[in-house]
Image: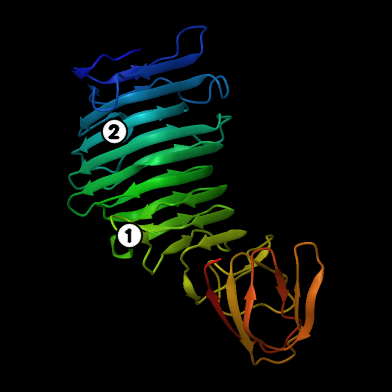
Amino acid sequence: MFILPGSYVCTSGLTFSKPANLNFDYTIKGSGQHASQVKPSYITTTLTDWEQGAYAGRVVIEDINIEIGNSNPPNNILANFGFVDLFMTNVLWRFFYGGSSRAEFLACGGPAGPSQPVVWRNVSVFGTSSGASVTVVYQWYEGFAWVGGLVDPVMGGGGQATGIYCGGHTLLQEIDSADGPWLYFIQQNAGGLTVINVEFPSASQAYYLIGSGGNSTIILNPLRNEANDLFSPPFSYLHFHDGGPLVFKMIGASLGLLSNPFATPAAQQAVMGVVTGTASPTANTDYLVNSDIVVNISGGAGISITIYDNYGHVITSGLTSLTAHRMQPGMHVNFGDFSDAPTVVVVHVSG
């Protein structure tokens, strides 16, 4: 579908259907961002699952503006590309939501699906809500990369925005943020999250900048929105589950003092560093270090510290204390079969 220059108002919503005996495969190409504009009341599809695998549901959108306003969209989703691989280049979205229930502006993909790796380039998402909380972008793919763009929700009343929900492995790069306030700027469900040169909201505007349930989080050169400068601390991060990611790497900022740096989740690898855990270690436990940290260890009784790598090669052993000792992701530490736990101070630093 090719859209000529102009602004086109739809009398209702747009519904993408799967043709009989054919794949679900659509292309919408405008004449250029700001030259072509479409204004439906909602967008939705007839798909309810990954019906024919990764190649069945695909929509490509290029070089266009799309504007949607609604107070009661289907399933409280203004643009619903569920179970669809949505590829976009040079697309600007504007959403206006007047409902009272939590809503999603732009949703695509879905859980447990055989999706293709999906790429967005130069995609900006603006939106306003008169009071209800919203998720600005919800995406769930096996692989997703968004390079260049903006997330800008203006929240009225007591509403908060979740900026980008990441269901699976995700790369976010060169993305700006504005307005809010935010519940989470980024919410990671599972897999790995890599964030490069992204402008984060200020700490005062977000409950947490990143909330995560994933196995790895890597943040390179976090920036401060509207400032063209490195992010100013504190940087707020929350791991949702008992434990922590196996890797948390941050270059250009840090989390500072970690008050509860030890986690021993049942039937899983014990983790030391950026975790949801406790203040003291457990005796005779192998802790995987998941982040760049500086450690001070003192006191206790029966302490015998062993540090080794991911392959079990001993780096040092038999220590009873440590002072300003630097540890990196992938290292392991065991405090021995102590009878009285030591005092451990752990500080996260930029890696």
Quarter of the figure with the N terminus = top left
Q: Quadrant of residue 342?
A: bottom right
Callout 1–callout 2 Cβ contact below 8 Å: no
| Secondary element at image label 1 | strand
Q: Above or below — where is 129 with respect to 249?
A: above
Q: Which residue type does callout 1 highlight?
A: Ala
Q: Which residue is mark 2?
A: 93
Q: Is residue 25 left or right of residue 76?
A: right
Q: Is residue 182 left or right of residue 89?
A: left
What separation in Å lies between label 1 and label 2 (alpha carbons)?
23 Å
Q: Which residue is mark 1?
A: 206
Relative image position of residue 197 (x, y in whole percent) = 43, 52
Crowd band around label 2 with a 10 angstrom C-alpha radius: few (<14), some (14–19), many (20+): many
Q: Which residue type does callout 2 highlight?
A: Trp
Residue 9 visible to the viewer: no
Give the label on residue 190, or none.
none
Relative image position of residue 132 (x, y in whole percent) = 23, 46
Q: Is residue 256 left or right of residue 269?
A: left
Task: Return the residue found at the far top.
Answer: 21
| Secondary element at image label 2 | strand
Count how many numbered circles sit on residues in the image: 2
Q: Earlier in the sequence, mark 1 or mark 2?
A: 2
Q: Above or below — where is 77 with respect to 18?
A: below
Q: Is residue 324 left or right of residue 49?
A: right
Q: Residue at x 42, y 32 (%)?
A: 108
Q: Above or below — where is 208 with respect to 159?
A: below
Q: Residue at x 58, y 77 (%)?
A: 294
Image depth: mark 1 or mark 2 in front = 2
Relative image position of residue 107 (x, y in whole percent) = 39, 34
